Image (cartoon, rainbow, N blue to C red):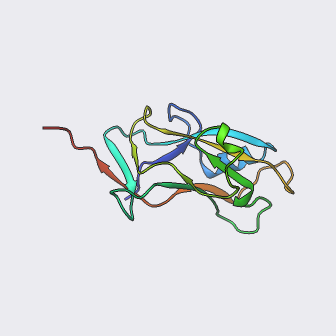
Amino acid sequence: MSVSLRFYLDAALSVEATPAEFAVLLGAGSVERQLWLGSVEDGRVFHAADDPLGAPIMVEVVETAPGGAVSPSDIRLALTAGALASAAPGAPLNVGAEIQGGASPAVPLWLRWTPSGAGVGAHAGLALQTTEVVETAVESPT
C-alpha cells in the first residue's frame, strides 16, 4: 500500500514535486527553493516505520541513476532559508517524529544547490525521499 506523504512545490499541496520537476529545478543553475512535505489526506498521521513512537522522519536527496553530473552531496537541506548556510552538504534533514495530514500542517523545507562542475540543464538522476514511514488514521476522541 502506498502512503500519501509527498513533496510539493506549493504550500497548498496542489503541485507535486515529482522527480522530473526536481530535475528541472536543478537545471536552472544555482537554486534556492522552498518545498513542502505533506499529505492532502486529512485525518492521517505519519511516523518513521522503524520506531513509530519517536524516531525522526528524515529527508534526503538520493541518486536514482548513478553517475550523473550532480551528486546528492551538492545539495543542502534545511527547515528555514537561514539555516541553509550552515547545513552540511548532502546531509539528511530531520523533519520531526510526526507529520499530520492536510495542507496546514505540511512541513516547509528549503533546498540549496550551487553547481560546482555541472552546467545548467536538466539534471535527472536525483530525487527527494523520506525514510520509510507508516501512515495511520487519526483516531477521533470519543
User: Residue drawn 75% across and 56% down?
Assistant: 74
Give how far across and how far down residue 101 sits, in percent. 38, 40
| Nearer to me, 88 or 119 | 88
Query: Which residue occupies the extreme front position in the image?
Result: 86
| Nearer to me, 70 or 84 | 84
User: Residue drawn 72% across and 40% down?
Assistant: 32
Rendered image quadrant of residue 85: top right
Query: Which residue occupies the extreme bottom position in the image?
Result: 66
Query: Which residue occupies the extreme left position in the image?
Result: 142
Decide if residue 11 is on the left or right side of residue 100.
Answer: right
**Residue 68, above or below 17:** below
Decide if residue 28 is on the left or right side of residue 15.
Answer: right
User: Residue drawn 71% across and 56% down?
Assistant: 124
Rendered image quadrant of residue 47: bottom left
Looking at the rendered image, the quarter that the C terminus falls into is: top left
User: Residue drawn 41% across and 56% down?
Assistant: 2
Looking at the rendered image, the quarter that the N terminus falls into is: bottom left
- Count of numbered badges drawn on the protein: 0
Give how far across and how far down residue 89 sits, in percent. 71, 56
Give how far across and how far down residue 78 sits, in percent. 61, 45
Give how far across and how far down residue 112 sits, in percent. 71, 45
**Residue 65, above or below 98:** below
